[in-house]
Image (spheres, helix red, strand yellow):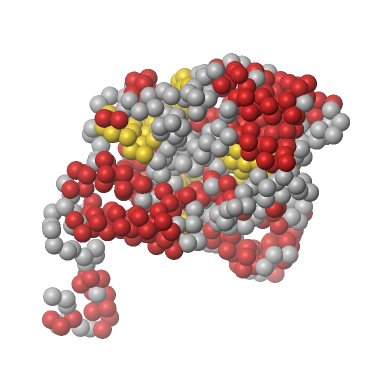
Amino acid sequence: MTDTQTVDLERFVAGVVERYGHDPMNLLQVLRDVQDRYACISDEAAAAVGQAMQIAPMHVQCVVDFYSFLHRTPRGRYDVLFSDNIVDRMLGKDALMAQLCERLAVTPGETRTDGRVSIDNTSCTGMPDQGPAMLVNGWALTHLTPARIDTIADLIDREVPLVKWPGIYCEVEDNVRRRDLLLGEPYIDGSALRAVTQRGPEAALDEMMASGLRGLGGAGFKTASKWALSRQAEGHEHFVVCNADEGEPGTFKDRVLLQSHANLVFEGMAVCARVVGARRGFVYLRGEYRYMLDLLQITLAQRRRAGLLGRGILGVEGFDFDIEIHLGAGAYICGEESALLESLEGKRGVPRKRPPFPVTRGHHNEPTVVNNVETFAAAAKIAVNGGAWWAARGTEQSPGTKLLSVSGDCARPGVYEYPFGVTVRQVLEDCGARDTQAVQIAGPAGHLVPEREFDRRIAHEDIITGGSFMVFDRGRDLLDVVRNFAGFFRHESCGFCTPCRVGTTLMRDLVEKVAGGHGTPYDLQEMKHLGKVMKQASHCGLGLTAPNPVLDTLDKFPEIWAGRLKSRDFEPAFDLDAALAESRALTGRDDVHAHLG
Ligand code: SF4
């Protein structure tokens, strides 16, 4: 770098750090802004950030390396990332990616030598109801077709700025197909807060308790119990955190809530703040949803102007609460609440040891309620309508309703709101699925439900899900599904503990070996053994559930594995002789002793 460039960099970094209040907690946000300006976080940029924030440059670099949307070297000026969810693949993503790579002469995973464009895969971008989808410089594009890919190649060739691309390419539809308690009735902004200020925090908590609301992200912990524990916990300050890191492949209902019902979510957070006595709240928004950041900031500003956020909410003295939005940077593990809290503090998103749990020691070690988007939206509605209103729907152990993100082989993909207890069969009928072979519920970590189990129910008593519902008809090879999921877990393992870091790679390799026709019964036993070790020894839920797609299909669909076994003898997973070819060439040896066998 020239002296002028260094001065420019340091001045820019100083400005960004100043804007974020020199708070190390904002490191991730600072790094995002620096990358937006300089296309990457170079060693010089990491050093400048470290100096301005009083953080060791090595720590800054470790954070950069952790998040897949941060880079140490520049990617293309058009950074194209195809959503690599199995449903995007089923919709033709691989062919479209190959088409774009060919049109632009780009090797997947690399940046073109002129620096104009890079093309790669990324995990599910949360648009399988309108895929294939991609991100370009962080902005979402949907409904990709060969014709659109041609136009996109042309736009990149001519270096047309993204803001001048056809607006329809960037449209993200809600696709709400069924409404119930949450989405069914119009909501008047401020009504939940008015109800809570009239009732008082204790009575508001009682209503929440009466509703029986359970966390709708999948874990199902009683929301009122969580709020009560946090309210009782001692601390200097209490926090409310909204988990909007909707990274489970096939899930997109939080996208719809944030895009079209953000007031409901923010109001639920404010209700929680009133109950637990928090003054600060955070929305941790997944990086893939960056396209809605400006809209969410506008909504927050409107709420401040309307007296629904900020100091003295609704004129109540001492009811002060405000919300900040933190943008993630492409790490699925940050959907795990303790990893999210680490990320929120500007660190790598490595899950914490628990206990202590966030309700007593969360953000900055203070009592913190972490709920997901849907749970806060439901809390706002319950505050208005009362606990009995919510508890009257659903089942005994699962009161209320659940939003399902339905995608895959069906005529009407989209968001469906059902009372808990709905059968898998009913959902399939409503979404226009035909000749269904299996449904993956709760994402890759969940359950693959075969046809003989379609009368099972979505509820805590039976199958529980954060919302993902992916449909596969009989024309699909379920081994393709397993391969996609195994690759996903290998990519998203945070690397902190060995059973998961090594286990996800070994499992992916074994799956590929069998799928490629080189597997033996021994490999299937190995997969079972490996899955058991991962389930016993992994540090967090990702590692514990990563073997599920393999173990589930070995149990329920053994035929898809058996059909690929051609040999009963041991077969190596790779060709060692071919791997030695380069060494032979370098040493000039090609005699019989330089070959195996
Ligand atoms: Fe990280 Fe996987 Fe270990 Fe969880 S189980 S801490 S994701 S390596």
As rendered, which of 436 and 356 lies closer to the eye? 356
For residue 297, what is the image quadrant?
Answer: top right
Taking the image as shown, residue 452 lies to the left or right of residue 277, namely left
Disc count in the image?
0
Write the residue at 59% across / 64% down.
61
Q: Position of residue 116 (x, y in %)?
A: 48, 53
As rendered, which of 223 and 78 lies closer to the eye? 223
As rendered, which of 63 and 8 lies closer to the eye? 63
Write the residue at 84% across / 28% down.
316
For residue 436, what is the image quadrant?
Answer: top left
Q: Is residue 520 visible?
A: yes
Write the residue at 37% across / 58% down.
533
Q: Position of residue 131 (x, y in %)?
A: 41, 34
Write the residue at 58% across / 34% down.
222
For residue 60, what is the image quadrant?
Answer: bottom right
As rendered, which of 478 and 146 lies closer to the eye? 478
Q: Position of residue 580 (x, y in %)?
A: 24, 74
Residue 550 versus residue 570 in the image, above or below? above
**Image quadrant where one finds the N terminus:** bottom right
**Image quadrant where one finds the C terminus:** bottom left
Q: Position of residue 306 (x, y in %)?
A: 78, 25
Q: Is residue 306 visible?
A: no
